[in-house]
Image: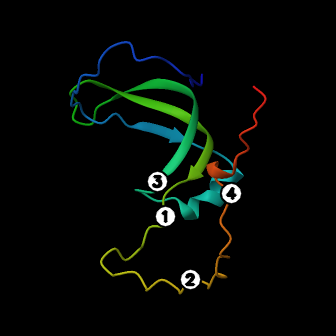
């Protein structure tokens, strides 16, 4: 099941603070083998998930049953910039931007240049 939609907000928002709900996402095959070197904990990705389901498990502390939301990754795209492996060091200075040709002195067309003889 994949849910995507446009909707109207039915109630005024109410701020609530609840614990984070993680989704365990899985991907299989050659695709994950190619992506694995680029994925690490904290990597920012945009994903489309399908087949969501809840799995139950026994908690390690013996306090009863736990629940886990799981889904299959159908699309994955990287977002954000590259993470610096050595977070404590400052990044290298950026390379100089290539020079751009000077803009011509001719004025770009704007609203003042529109024809006043509109037939409607």
N-terminal-most mark, 3 or 2: 3
Query: Which residue lies under the disc numbered 2?
Result: 97
Looking at the image, residue 46 sits to the left or right of residue 68; the answer is right
Per the model, the C-alpha gap separating discs 3 and 1 is: 9 Å
N-terminal-most mark, 4 or 1: 1
The quarter in which the N terminus is drawn is top right
56, above or below 26, in the image: above
Which label number is shown at residue 44?
Answer: 3
Query: Which residue lies under the disc numbered 1?
Result: 81
Q: Nearer the viewer, residue 60 or 37?
A: 37
Percent position of residue 36, x then y: 57, 59
17, above or below 14, in the image: below
Residue at 48% in and 58% down: 80
Percent position of residue 119, x then y: 79, 29
Circle nearer the viewer, 4 or 1: 4
Which structural element holds mark 2? loop
Residue at 20% in and 27% down: 63
Which structural element holds mark 1? loop
Per the model, the C-alpha gap separating discs 4 and 1 is: 37 Å
Circle nearer the viewer, 3 or 2: 2
Residue at 42% in and 73% down: 84
N-terminal-most mark, 4 or 3: 3
Which label number is shown at residue 109?
Answer: 4
Q: Residues within 10 Å of mark 3 (few under 14, many from 20)?
A: some
Which label number is shown at residue 10?
Answer: none
Looking at the image, residue 2 sits to the left or right of residue 89; the answer is right
Circle nearer the viewer, 3 or 1: 1
Per the model, the C-alpha gap separating discs 2 and 4 is: 28 Å
Q: Is there a contact, CB below 8 Å, between mark 3 and mark 2?
A: no
Per the model, the C-alpha gap separating discs 3 and 2 is: 27 Å
């Amino acid at each position: 099941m994949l849910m995507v939609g446009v909707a109207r907000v039915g109630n005024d928002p109410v701020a609530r603070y609840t614990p984070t709900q993680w989704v365990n996402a899985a991907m299989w095959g050659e695709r994950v083998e190619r992506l694995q070197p680029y994925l690490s904990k904290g990597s920012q990705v945009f994903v489309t998930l399908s087949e969501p389901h809840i799995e139950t498990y026994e908690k390690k502390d013996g306090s009863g049953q736990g629940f886990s939301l799981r889904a299959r990754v159908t699309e994955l795209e990287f977002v954000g910039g590259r993470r610096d492996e050595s977070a404590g060091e400052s990044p290298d200075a950026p390379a100089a931007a290539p020079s751009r040709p000077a803009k011509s002195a001719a004025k770009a067309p704007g609203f003042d240049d529109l024809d006043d003889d509109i037939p409607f």
